[in-house]
Amino acid sequence: MEPLTVPGSQDSLQKIRQYLTSATQEAGIEKRAYKLCLAVDEIATNIITHGYDEVGLKGNIYLEAKIDRESLAIVLEDTGIPYDPTTRETVTAETLRKLLEKKDLGGWGVYLAMEGVDEFKYERVGDRNRNILIVNRTKTSLMDNG
Protein backbone atom coordinates (compact mmCIF):
# COMPACT_ATOMS: atom_id res chain seq x y z
CA MET A 1 0.00 0.00 0.00
CA GLU A 2 1.03 3.56 -0.58
CA PRO A 3 2.12 5.40 2.58
CA LEU A 4 -0.15 8.08 4.07
CA THR A 5 0.93 11.42 5.53
CA VAL A 6 -1.55 13.42 7.61
CA PRO A 7 -1.27 16.48 9.85
CA GLY A 8 -0.71 15.65 13.51
CA SER A 9 -4.19 16.77 14.57
CA GLN A 10 -7.38 15.15 15.86
CA ASP A 11 -9.01 15.86 12.48
CA SER A 12 -6.67 13.30 10.88
CA LEU A 13 -7.87 10.32 12.92
CA GLN A 14 -10.68 9.53 10.47
CA LYS A 15 -8.23 9.36 7.54
CA ILE A 16 -5.99 7.08 9.59
CA ARG A 17 -8.95 4.78 10.32
CA GLN A 18 -9.88 4.64 6.64
CA TYR A 19 -6.29 3.75 5.72
CA LEU A 20 -6.29 0.97 8.33
CA THR A 21 -9.60 -0.41 7.07
CA SER A 22 -8.12 -0.70 3.59
CA ALA A 23 -4.94 -2.30 4.94
CA THR A 24 -6.79 -4.92 7.01
CA GLN A 25 -8.99 -5.77 4.03
CA GLU A 26 -6.00 -6.12 1.73
CA ALA A 27 -4.23 -8.32 4.30
CA GLY A 28 -7.35 -10.44 4.82
CA ILE A 29 -7.48 -9.84 8.57
CA GLU A 30 -10.84 -8.10 8.87
CA LYS A 31 -11.67 -10.16 11.98
CA ARG A 32 -8.71 -8.61 13.78
CA ALA A 33 -9.26 -5.11 12.40
CA TYR A 34 -11.02 -3.69 15.46
CA LYS A 35 -8.13 -4.34 17.88
CA LEU A 36 -5.52 -3.13 15.39
CA CYS A 37 -7.51 0.03 14.65
CA LEU A 38 -7.93 0.68 18.36
CA ALA A 39 -4.19 0.20 18.90
CA VAL A 40 -3.21 2.55 16.07
CA ASP A 41 -5.84 5.08 17.15
CA GLU A 42 -4.40 5.12 20.69
CA ILE A 43 -0.83 5.61 19.45
CA ALA A 44 -1.87 8.32 16.97
CA THR A 45 -3.88 10.12 19.65
CA ASN A 46 -0.87 10.01 22.00
CA ILE A 47 1.35 11.41 19.23
CA ILE A 48 -1.08 14.27 18.61
CA THR A 49 -1.76 15.03 22.28
CA HIS A 50 1.58 14.43 23.97
CA GLY A 51 4.07 14.58 21.11
CA TYR A 52 2.73 17.73 19.47
CA ASP A 53 -0.08 19.66 21.21
CA GLU A 54 1.07 19.62 24.86
CA VAL A 55 4.56 20.82 23.97
CA GLY A 56 3.49 23.37 21.35
CA LEU A 57 4.82 21.52 18.32
CA LYS A 58 3.26 20.98 14.92
CA GLY A 59 4.06 18.05 12.69
CA ASN A 60 2.77 15.20 10.60
CA ILE A 61 2.03 11.56 11.22
CA TYR A 62 3.44 9.21 8.60
CA LEU A 63 1.77 5.81 8.17
CA GLU A 64 2.75 2.84 6.09
CA ALA A 65 1.11 -0.57 5.86
CA LYS A 66 3.50 -3.39 5.03
CA ILE A 67 1.85 -6.67 4.09
CA ASP A 68 3.73 -9.91 3.60
CA ARG A 69 2.82 -13.59 3.80
CA GLU A 70 3.06 -13.69 7.60
CA SER A 71 1.83 -10.33 8.82
CA LEU A 72 0.49 -6.83 8.46
CA ALA A 73 2.79 -4.22 9.96
CA ILE A 74 1.60 -0.67 10.49
CA VAL A 75 4.41 1.82 10.86
CA LEU A 76 3.61 5.19 12.44
CA GLU A 77 6.28 7.89 12.48
CA ASP A 78 6.22 11.38 13.93
CA THR A 79 8.64 14.21 14.70
CA GLY A 80 7.20 14.94 18.13
CA ILE A 81 9.15 14.71 21.34
CA PRO A 82 10.93 11.37 21.82
CA TYR A 83 8.71 8.81 23.55
CA ASP A 84 9.25 5.06 23.73
CA PRO A 85 5.99 3.36 24.78
CA THR A 86 7.82 0.07 25.36
CA THR A 87 9.55 1.57 28.42
CA ARG A 88 6.23 2.10 30.18
CA GLU A 89 5.89 0.09 33.38
CA THR A 90 4.62 -3.46 33.04
CA VAL A 91 0.90 -3.71 33.54
CA THR A 92 0.03 -5.83 36.54
CA ALA A 93 -3.25 -6.56 38.30
CA GLU A 94 -2.39 -3.72 40.70
CA THR A 95 -1.75 -1.26 37.82
CA LEU A 96 -5.07 -2.22 36.23
CA ARG A 97 -6.87 -1.76 39.54
CA LYS A 98 -5.40 1.74 39.92
CA LEU A 99 -6.40 2.67 36.36
CA LEU A 100 -9.95 1.48 37.00
CA GLU A 101 -10.16 3.56 40.20
CA LYS A 102 -9.08 6.77 38.45
CA LYS A 103 -11.78 9.30 37.66
CA ASP A 104 -10.34 10.21 34.24
CA LEU A 105 -9.88 7.72 31.45
CA GLY A 106 -6.23 8.49 30.67
CA GLY A 107 -3.49 5.92 30.98
CA TRP A 108 -5.06 3.07 28.98
CA GLY A 109 -3.76 3.95 25.50
CA VAL A 110 -0.37 2.25 25.48
CA TYR A 111 -1.75 -0.80 27.29
CA LEU A 112 -4.59 -1.16 24.76
CA ALA A 113 -2.18 -0.68 21.85
CA MET A 114 0.21 -3.37 23.03
CA GLU A 115 -2.60 -5.79 23.90
CA GLY A 116 -4.26 -5.32 20.51
CA VAL A 117 -1.36 -6.52 18.37
CA ASP A 118 0.91 -9.55 18.20
CA GLU A 119 4.09 -7.49 18.36
CA PHE A 120 4.86 -3.86 19.17
CA LYS A 121 8.23 -2.23 18.46
CA TYR A 122 9.62 1.25 18.93
CA GLU A 123 12.67 2.87 17.32
CA ARG A 124 14.05 6.38 17.38
CA VAL A 125 15.37 7.09 13.88
CA GLY A 126 16.97 10.50 13.48
CA ASP A 127 14.38 13.02 14.65
CA ARG A 128 11.49 10.57 14.36
CA ASN A 129 9.63 8.24 16.67
CA ARG A 130 8.78 5.02 14.85
CA ASN A 131 6.06 2.79 16.29
CA ILE A 132 5.59 -0.56 14.56
CA LEU A 133 2.43 -2.56 15.23
CA ILE A 134 2.37 -6.10 13.83
CA VAL A 135 -0.59 -8.44 13.44
CA ASN A 136 0.02 -11.98 12.27
CA ARG A 137 -2.08 -13.23 9.39
CA THR A 138 -3.96 -16.52 9.81
CA LYS A 139 -3.48 -19.53 7.59
CA THR A 140 -6.96 -18.95 6.19
CA SER A 141 -6.14 -15.40 5.13
CA LEU A 142 -2.88 -16.64 3.57
CA MET A 143 -4.82 -19.07 1.42
CA ASP A 144 -7.32 -16.40 0.43
CA ASN A 145 -4.84 -13.57 -0.23
CA GLY A 146 -1.37 -15.05 -0.15
Image (tube, rainbow, N blue to C red):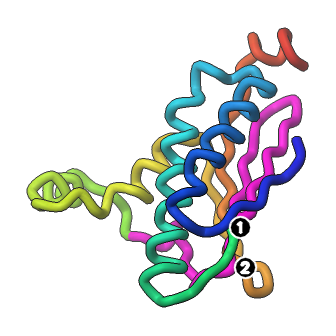
60 relative to 57 in the view: left or right: right
- Camera-side residue of 103 and 60: 60
Question: Residue at the spot x=33%, y=56% of the render?
Answer: 108
10 relative to 23 in the view: left or right: left
The three-letter amino acid code for the residue at tag 2 is Arg
Which residue in the rendered view is the most extreme toward the front?
11
- The residue beneath circle 2 is 128
What kind of element bears circle 1? strand
Q: From what the image shows, is residue 135 above or below residue 14?
A: above
Question: Residue at the spot x=75%, y=34% of the render?
Answer: 23
Question: Residue at the spot x=42%, y=48% of the render?
Answer: 112
In percent of width and height, residue 107 lies at 31, 63
Report which quarter residue 130 is drawn in. bottom right
What kind of element bears circle 2? strand
133 relative to 54 in the view: left or right: right
The three-letter amino acid code for the residue at tag 1 is Glu
Report which quarter residue 129 is drawn in. bottom right
Q: From what the image shows, is residue 112 above or below residue 131?
A: above
53 relative to 126 in the view: left or right: left
Chain-order first, disc 2 or disc 1: 1
- The residue beneath circle 1 is 77
- Camera-side residue of 10 and 98: 10
In percent of width and height, residue 38 lies at 49, 42
The answer to whether marks 2 and 1 mark residues whose Cβ atoms lie closer than 8 Å is yes
Question: Residue at the spot x=73%, y=24% of the render?
Answer: 25
Residue 3 falls inside the magenta stretch: no
In percent of width and height, residue 59 lies at 66, 78
What residue span does the magenta drawing correspond to?
61-88
